[in-house]
Image (cartoon, grey):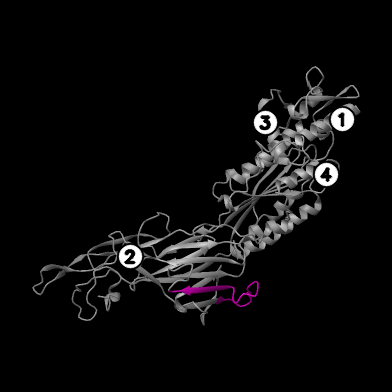
Amino acid sequence: MKKRILAFLLCAVMVLLLPATGAAAVDLGEWQTSKSKTATQLDSAFESKVTLSLPSAEEQLVTDIVFVLDKSTSAALEQQALGMLSELKEQAEDTGAKVKVGVVIFNKVANVTGFMDLATEYDAIEEAITQEIKSGTNTHAGLLAGKAMLDNDTSVDAARKYLIFVSDGITYMYDEDAKIVPYYWLNDNSPYYSSDPYSWQFQYGSNNPPSDWAALIGQIGETLEKETIIPILYDDKAQLTQETAVSVEDKDADEYTSSVGRALYYTHQTYAAAREAGYNCYAITADTSSGSQYLWGPSFMNFLAGNKEVSFSNIQNDILYLLDAGSTVVDVIGNDTDNHGNSYDFKFVPDAGKLTLTVGDKTYTTTEVTPADGETARFRFNFEGVTAKNQAEAPFVLHYYENGTGNNPDEHFVWDINVPVSNFAPVQLTYSVVLTNPQKTEGTYGEYDGNGSRNLGSLYTNNEATLYPVASDGNRGNPEDFPKPTVSYTVGKAPVKDEEGKNDYKDTVTIEIKGDKKEEKNPDTGAPSSLVFVGAAAALKGIF
């Protein structure tokens, strides 16, 4: 037996030295922040109100949270999970946000409790999380069920789906119906079957984890492609004999897959697939007595977590907060050529009365303050009881540069976000831009696309707006562009009566606002105006 253990140790060393070729490491993906930008059609002063919203004002805030819990999850971890849900429940009740919670407890199969509303079914959620289930450990079945719950809820955006996997990582069966592989080793001349956690030690010589999980996962995947053994159900393990099972006595450790190896491989693949689907995934290591014996189990969970400490407090912040303090938005005001080749130029309106900032249902006070060097104007947004982080001057600050700056020569503003932004209380900044040079010649200029979803080409209220995000964990994300809304107006001819009461077409100008057209008379004389603006007649005075 000692010689056999030595052989296993040598095999383990060979496995650990394998290169990472073919390894299926977890892909963290790209972080994308929910956001929107909208613009109203031009009003009588050729102004458009533009709104930046974080998160998007066009998405109903619905959140899916699925717990995938090992049957042996401790009461302490269960209480931490419930504490997190209790905090989120208060936020949901205060803001009207909808949070749905699903629970999967796995033993040899997944035991699934469907989605429940956090605000109204908290007691049922608590009962589901604290239920006692025994017999077996199949992490793969648990994750399959948890991912399926998120996959099947197509009404919720992937970015608002959270998968929380809690286990000590010790598993030895796989698939929904709990399979094992019918391999065996000889132990004191008696067959020992691959049907429990001891399979790892028999294959690799100890219960220590590999030094490179990605390499080992890759090697297991390569072996699986070549294996021809037929798995059996865990419930049928009592029927195994030396005649019906397959000996691995003459195989190296990397020439076959044990039940433990397969279970870990498929667990990893399912967890990685959930991340690739855009779901927020968390692996929390459960502290169990078995974990101190089978060291590869907790090590595997740490591998899934990216070797980062994960807590319910961290997860709560990720669910609750869209952005952290330190995030900024740079917004470049629109100027270009329209669909007729004419230059157009919008200007930001630097007026405190034209600026509104709301957080949820709270409207902040806008104050214009003395601008710093290089600034054209500066505005602060405050609300009683809300304090900016890092000693910033206000929770939100807008810096306006009419003539640009050295690294950004175009007219623009910078919006500093100095407090965390909650997913449950959207932050919306509304400001005005004015078209300074409307055309006189007959025609339609631009095309209205209030939220930028159609990717049209002219009369952009803003050439670009870019978010520079900071995540709730303090990490900076990549810059993200807002959509680009467009507006339009129409200059045309409208019939007016001449002195003899006959129809006569004179040069007229109309602005089409949301498809609503009407003819206007001269407000001073009552006679038909030779310049007719639909919804904008008053603005013509002094312009032409």
Residue tagged 4:
291
**Observer-nearest residue: 209 or 193?**
209
Please give left or right for residue 55 compared with residue 227 in the image: left
In three-dimensional space, the C-alpha distance between marks 4 and 1, rounded to whole angstroms, equals: 22 Å
Q: Position of residue 393 (x, y in %)?
A: 60, 77
- Report the mark closest to the observer, 4 or 1: 1
Q: Secondary structure at mark 1?
A: helix
Residue tagged 2:
513
- Report the mark closest to the observer, 1 or 2: 1
Residue tagged 1:
5
Q: What span is colored magenta in the figure?
A: 381-402
Q: Quadrant of the C terminus?
A: bottom left
Question: Which numbered disc, 3 or 4, marks the residue that appears first in the sequence?
Answer: 3
Q: Secondary structure at mark 3?
A: helix
Residue tagged 3:
222
The residue type indicated by label 1 comes to Ile
In three-dimensional space, the C-alpha distance between marks 2 and 3, rounded to whole angstroms, equals: 63 Å
Q: Overall secondary structure of the magenta stretch?
A: loop
Question: Which numbered disc, 4 or 1, marks the residue that appears first in the sequence?
Answer: 1
